[in-house]
Image (tube, grey):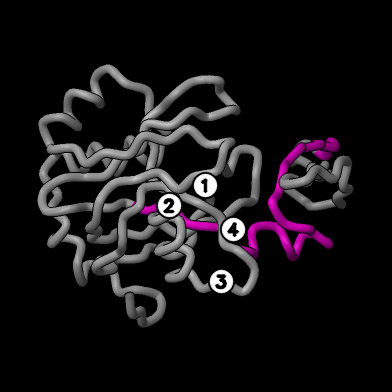
């Protein structure tokens, strides 16, 4: 594909819509719509900024899952704790803040941090980290009035049962599958070196 140009078609409060133009291998014009959380000046900006984090949290031999209402699909699904980086916030600060806001939990230890990946590549250039943490504390809700979240730790057998019957986001489904298959939190420690040194 040969990139020909891009144009912003809508500037929403949180999402910006762009139309990209390409020349395909048959020599025809291909138009493609995307949304971005960032202001894009040109093709050099596509996918170059990290927006947030998804958090896979464990406590002892249990995994944290959120049961939350998602406006975009008008239903409740199982999901990971996740959120957006705020201005001038480090990734560690974001992980700690989001985990506390959505669950009331604290980060004991960062087990691993995956490099940023594309979270919705079919229609967006959004990139986020995936963090694996050990967490502790009492579950409580500090979310805004626009969020409905119920957080709980689940055993492997409970997660196996949920995977058979419940709706998940794709990242939470993948993490839950590996947890249910026997991957332990201690297996993650040192497996992937964090992209920077962290203190939590």
**Towards the viewer: 64 or 41:** 64
Instruction: Tell which circle, 3 or 1, labels the residue nearer the N-terminal end.
Output: 3
Q: Residue at x 89, y 48 (%)?
A: 7
* Residues packed near mark 1 inside 10 Å, few (<14), some (14 to 19) or many (20 plus): some
Q: Is residue 12 above or below residue 91?
A: above
Foreground mark, 2 or 3, reads: 3
Residue under label 1: 119
Q: Is residue 37 part of the magenta span, yes or no?
A: yes
Percent from the top left, x then y, of residue 170? 41, 36
Residue under label 4: 51
**Towards the viewer: 150 or 62:** 150
Residue under label 2: 54
Percent from the top left, x then y, of residue 112? 29, 66
Q: Is residue 136 part of the magenta span, yes or no?
A: no
Tell me where the magenta segment starts and ends, as one range: 27-55
Q: Residue at x 48, y 28 (%)?
A: 69
* Residues packed near mark 2 inside 10 Å, few (<14), some (14 to 19) or many (20 plus): many
Asked which secondary structure carries label 1, the reply is loop
Cα distance, mark 3 to mark 1? 20 Å
Instruction: Tell which circle, 4 or 1, labels the residue nearer the N-terminal end.
Output: 4
Instruction: Tell which circle, 3 or 4, labels the residue nearer the N-terminal end.
Output: 4
């Amino acid at each position: 594909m040969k990139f020909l140009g891009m144009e912003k078609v809508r500037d929403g409060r949180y999402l910006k819509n762009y139309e990209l133009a390409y020349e395909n291998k048959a020599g025809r014009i291909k138009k493609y719509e995307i949304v971005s959380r960032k202001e894009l000046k040109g093709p050099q900006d596509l996918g170059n900024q990290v927006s947030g984090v998804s958090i896979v949290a464990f406590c002892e031999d249990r995994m944290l899952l959120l049961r939350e209402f998602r406006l975009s699909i008008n239903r409740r699904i199982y999901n990971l704790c996740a959120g957006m980086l705020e201005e001038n916030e480090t990734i560690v600060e974001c992980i700690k803040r989001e985990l506390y806001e959505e669950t009331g939990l604290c980060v004991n230890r960062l087990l691993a941090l995956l490099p940023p990946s594309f979270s919705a590549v079919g229609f967006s250039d959004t990139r986020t980290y995936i963090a694996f943490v050990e967490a502790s504390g009492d579950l409580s809700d500090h979310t805004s009035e626009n969020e409905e979240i119920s957080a709980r730790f689940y055993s492997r057998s409970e997660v196996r049962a949920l995977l058979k019957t419940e709706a998940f986001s794709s990242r939470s489904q993948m993490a839950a599958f590996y947890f249910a298959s026997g991957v332990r939190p201690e297996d993650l420690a040192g497996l992937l070196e964090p992209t920077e040194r962290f203190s939590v």
